[in-house]
Amino acid sequence: METNKLVLVEHFCSNCDINFSFINALNEYGVIEIIVVDDKKYILNEQLKTLERAIQFHYDLNINIEGIDVIHNLLHQIDDLQEELRMTKSKLKVFKVDE
């Protein structure tokens, strides 16, 4: 896998002053995915928004890992429902009659 699309967890933790155990817990709950390449742990660039949101929930709002997992799953469900609604609206445009 190309490492230019990955962020080294060790650097992220040191730059953001985050404990690795927090990121590891998020990985265990499936909120983010840790990828191991050459014995180094990475996360995908596209997961940074999710990780930053989880950090804000935990450190700013004092939400525990279980709560973050619930919030993450609910936000994912909302995204799926919004996409489904968009697709349904698109299909219904075929039947729309101008008045």
Image (cartoon, grey):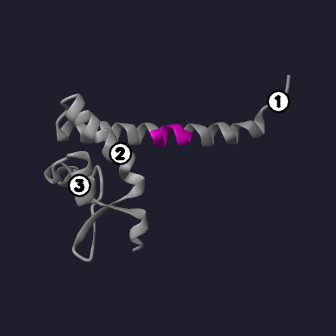
Q: Dot 3 corresponds to which residue?
A: 27
Quadrant assignment, res 50: top left
Magenta residues span 79-84
Q: Is residue 99 above or below residue 77?
A: above
Q: Is residue 19 above or below residue 88?
A: below
Task: Report the residue at 25% width, 38% height from top.
Answer: 68
**Image quadrant containing the N terminus:** bottom left
For the residues carrying marks 1 and 2, which lies nearer the camera in this image? 2
* Three-letter amino acid code at the position of disc 3: Asn
Instruction: Indicate the secondary structure of the residue bearing disc 3.
Output: helix
Q: Residue at x 57, y 37 (%)?
A: 85
> What is the CA distance from the residue labelled 1 to the residue labelled 2?
41 Å
Q: Is residue 34 left or right of residue 79?
A: left
Q: Amino acid at mark 2?
A: Thr
Which residue appears at 44% of the width and 36% of the height?
78
Q: Which comes before the other along the chain, label 1 or label 3?
A: 3
In the rendered structure, are the residues bearing label 1 and label 3 in contact, judged by CB atoms less than 8 Å apart?
no
* Magenta stretch contains residue 83: yes
Q: Residues within 10 Å of mark 1 (few under 14, many from 20)?
A: few
Label 3 crowd bin: few (<14), some (14–19), many (20+), radius 10 Å: some
Q: Which mark is residue 97?
A: 1
Residue closest to the eye, 24 or 14: 14
Percent from the top left, x then y, of residue 24? 18, 55
Q: Is residue 1 left or right of residue 91?
A: left
Count the marks. 3
Residue linked to disc 2: 50
Residue type indicated by callout 1:
Val
> Gap between marks 1 and 3, in whole Å?
49 Å
